Image (cartoon, rainbow, N blue to C red):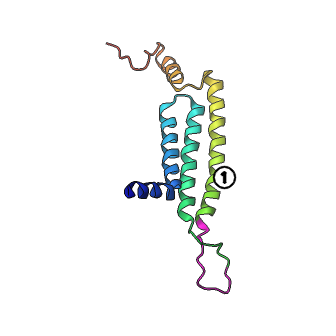
Amino acid sequence: MSEIVLDFDFFLSHYNYWMFVILMMTGLYVTVSRGNLIKKIVGLNLFQTSVFLLYISMGKIIGGTAPILVDDPETVYSNPLPQVLILTAIVVGIATTALALALVIRIRETYGTIEEDDILALEHEMEFGDAMPPPGRGTR
């Protein structure tokens, strides 16, 4: 019984890392499994958010304070570098998402769809002049 309590305590004390894993795997799954380009962008944003959570979790020191020097040299300070890097990464992530959405708009204007399979079929038809067989069915 004590092993179960210890495992539960371990889970609760590391919940931020578990959330990192859940968010990362969800984002990866959505990105890989969906054919809709907007859903792929949402999956990439989930993946990116999980990385932010990981870096911020690793940068926090329990009992640490802001790195403002005071009289006591024994004070434990938290490192501000992970937070600064994540702030920069958030700005870059927003710009990347805006660019991806702009590209999706242009793809929609050009092909009339944002579904990956439909775009590939239209590309094949434009290149070879014939209709592409449905995905998963070979021609023999």
Give the secondary structure at mark 1: helix
Q: Quadrant of residue 73?
A: bottom right
Q: Quadrant of residue 110?
A: top right
Q: Quadrant of residue 138?
A: top left
The x and y percentages for residue 45 are 58, 43
The image shows residue 75, relative to residue 20, as above or below, that is: below
The x and y percentages for residue 54 are 53, 56
71 is within the stretch colored magenta: yes
Point out the stretch of residues depicted in magenta. Answer: 69-81
Within 10 angstroms of label 1, few (less than 14), some, or many (20 or more) residues?
few
Under mark 1, the amino acid is Val
Q: Which residue is mark 1?
A: 91
Of residues 138 and 41, the one drawn nearer to the viewer in this rendering: 41
Q: Residue at x 47, y 35 (%)?
A: 32
Q: Left of 112 or right of it: where is 126? A: left
The image shows residue 55, relative to residue 127, as above or below, that is: below
The image shows residue 21, relative to residue 2, as above or below, that is: above
Q: Residue at x 57, y 43 (%)?
A: 46
The image shows residue 15, relative to residue 96, as above or below, that is: below
Q: Residue at x 38, y 16 (%)?
A: 137
Of residues 28 and 89, the one drawn nearer to the viewer in this rendering: 28
